Amino acid sequence: QVQLVESGGGSVQSGESLRLSCVASGFNFSTASMAWFRQAPGKERAWVTTVFGSGKLRYADPVKGRFTVSRDNAKNTLYLQMDSLNPEDSAMYYCAAGVRSPGWQHWGHGTQVTVSS
């Protein structure tokens, strides 16, 4: 069965960095579109970034220049390098996989990121 398992979250101070990982199994990772979403308490889930099977990247405006998404197809792993974190980045971060268009068919359970000022 499909599994997406996130890790790497934690509590940091403003300006610090974190690197999230998402290990995937049960589908063809190398051809799937992969994304990170986040959800803060009381807010809707928001898209953060996508890396397509082609390698093309997309970022939401609030994270451009600070976050970097990457994938290692040999390890079936998606990464999110988050630099210059600020309290507005505090949220549960979710990994998602799109194996067919449109939409995201598979989701992880999330990893919590908390940034204090």
Image (spheres, helix red, strand yellow):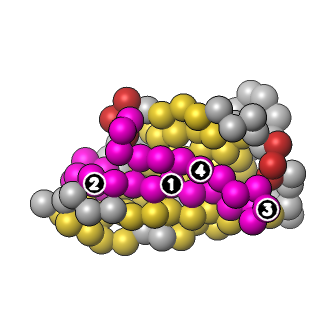
Cα–Cα gap, marks 3 and 1: 17 Å
How far is the residue under mark 1 from the one under mark 4?
A: 7 Å
Residue drawn at x 33%, y 62% as measured from the top left: 17
Residue annotated with mark 1: 80
Identify the residue at image location x=27%, y=52%.
84
**Which residue carries the number 4 mark?**
70
Instruction: Tell me the kind of residue under disc 3.
Output: Ala
Q: Is residue 45 above or below residue 75?
A: above
Amino acid type, callout 4: Ser
In the rendered image, residue 50, in percent from the top left (x then y), is placed at 59, 38
- The residue labelled by disc 2 is 85
Residue designated by label 3? 74
Left or right of 75 on screen, residue 45: left
Q: Using a 10 Å C-alpha cutoff, classify the residue at mark 4 as few (fewer than 14 neighbours), some (14 to 19) or many (20 or more).
A: some
Whole-Å distance between the Cαs marked 3 and 2? 29 Å
Q: Nearer the viewer, residue 84 or 62?
A: 84
